[in-house]
Image (spheres, rainbow, N blue to C red):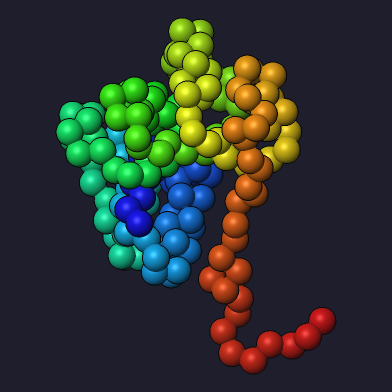
Amino acid sequence: MKILHLITSLSTGGAETHLLTLCRQLRKLGHHQISVCYLRDNVKGSKSLRARFELSGIDTWPLQTILSLILLPPPILHTHLPKADLCGWTVKRLHPKVKWVVTVHGKYAAWRGGRVGRWLWRIALQRADAIIAISKDLKVWLVRQGVPEEKVTVVYYGIEVDRYMPKGPHKKC
């Protein structure tokens, strides 16, 4: 199954690191063709994770224009962060058969999109096929924002425990 993840940037951050972990794990399962599209490589003063995605065998490519998504929509589009969510809404409106999943990583109260941007984002979320909230508190907040409760599923961030285990024999505590 082809899954395209669309994210605002590949800068080192919570949502971006989560996406890297998710893509690595999906790739390990081997049942999916995973690629990541980003609106920009990184934010000024931050380090890009693009090399880490590529070292993990995950295709990444910049979205210079939403036209490429409009002309060749993926079967599943999974968006992360408000700007990418708004692009996903555009694709969904033009291609209703695309399954659009949104992961909401936070409340985005300080998002630079302003009042209008937040209003458009809330409307967009109501059109998503499914929404993943990273905590119960975030699910409650989304429902208060007008998102139908039945669309929201709580999925906590995963941790690649084996990446943090010391090498060699382990002592039991």
| Front residue of 54 and 136 | 136
Judged from this view, the residue extending furthest toward the bottom is: 169
Is residue 119 in view from this perspective? yes
Is residue 45 in view from this perspective? no
Query: Is 169 above or below relative to 30?
Result: below
> In the image, what residue occupies the spot 46% across and 14% down?
120
Residue 40 falls in image quadrant = top left
Question: Which quarter of the rendering shows the C terminus?
Answer: bottom right
> In the image, what residue occupies the spot 18% across and 29% down?
67
> In the image, what residue occupies the spot 47% across and 24% down?
127
Residue 172 falls in image quadrant = bottom right
Say left or right for 89 vs 40.
Answer: right
Question: Which quarter of the rendering shows the N terminus?
Answer: bottom left
Say left or right for 98 vs 132.
Answer: left
Judged from this view, the residue extending furthest toward the right is: 173
Number of on-image labels? 0
**In the image, residue 21 lies at what x, y percent?**
48, 58
**In the image, residue 158 lies at what x, y percent?**
60, 57
**In the image, residue 84 lies at what x, y percent?**
38, 31
Say left or right for 59 vs 109.
Answer: left
**In the image, residue 25 lies at what x, y percent?**
47, 63
Query: Is 2 above or below relative to 121?
Result: below
| Front residue of 95 and 17 | 95
Query: Is 81 above or below relative to 158?
Result: above
Judged from this view, the residue extending furthest toward the front is: 97
